[in-house]
Amino acid sequence: MLKRTIYSLAIVAMIAGCSSGTKLNDAPVSDRSGAAGGQQGSSTAVAPVTIDPNASTAQGPVGIERIVYFDYDSYTVKPEFQALIDGHARFLKANQQRRISIEGHTDERGGREYNLALGQKRSEAVRRALTLLGVNDAQIEAVSFGKEKPAAQGSGEEAWAQNRRAEIRYTR
């Protein structure tokens, strides 16, 4: 009887589970704002951000990219995007009336529900990175489009890599 129960539970877990090994509830961002010492492999210069007197009509910081790319089946913000996040954080802190939407996207692989959840985790990871740098959470909205709005068409690693992203959009 015990074997039958365990076997039944194992089948239910396999059916309910996803084939992915990604743990969608683990936090991929850590607070390094007060850490002493340099980041591993980091030699990026931080671009200056000024308070824009026309910030209510501007589209955000000039010269700073707006897309964070992710590895396959991951929502961990890679160190190479720290300068991008720092620039947007400094702009948002200096222009507190500004609001952004972070749109999470995935490539075409995987089911619709899983990709919506993964896209949300990607947008939330960027949101967490910004709030850890002092951006007011009320300035940020995190949404997911899953695989519904690809940046590149095609079924290959080149297209998939462009679609695994979180885009920062200034809404006002």
Image (tube, helix red, strand yellow):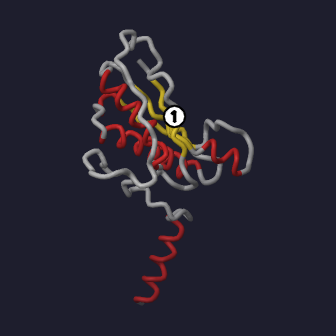
Query: In the rendering, at what x and y percent does residue 43 appear?
Result: 45, 45
Q: Is disc 1 surrounded by few (<14), some (14 to 19) or many (20+) residues within 10 Å? A: many
* Residue type at tag 1: Glu
What secondary structure is marked by label 1? strand
153 vs 46, nearest the viewer: 46
Residue 48 in picture, x, y percent from top left: 39, 26
Name the residue at 41% across, 17% down: 172
Horizontal side of residue 52 vs 8, given as left or right = left
Q: Nearer the viewer, residue 107 or 41?
A: 41
Task: Provide residue 126's location: percent of width, then percent of height.
Answer: 42, 41
Total label count? Answer: 1
* Residue at the image point whose x is 45% and y is 76% from the top: 9
Foreground of the two, 75 or 84: 84
Q: Please determine whether, in this image, residue 140 is positioned above or below residue 129.
A: above
Q: Residue at x 48, y 78 (%)?
A: 8
Residue at mark 1: 167
The image quadrant that residue 102 belongs to is top left
Q: Is residue 53 above or below residue 113?
A: above
> Viewer-proximal residue, 162 or 11?
162
Give above or below for 79 relative to 16: above
Give the quadrant of residue 100: top left
What x and y, as percent, mark residue 89? 36, 32
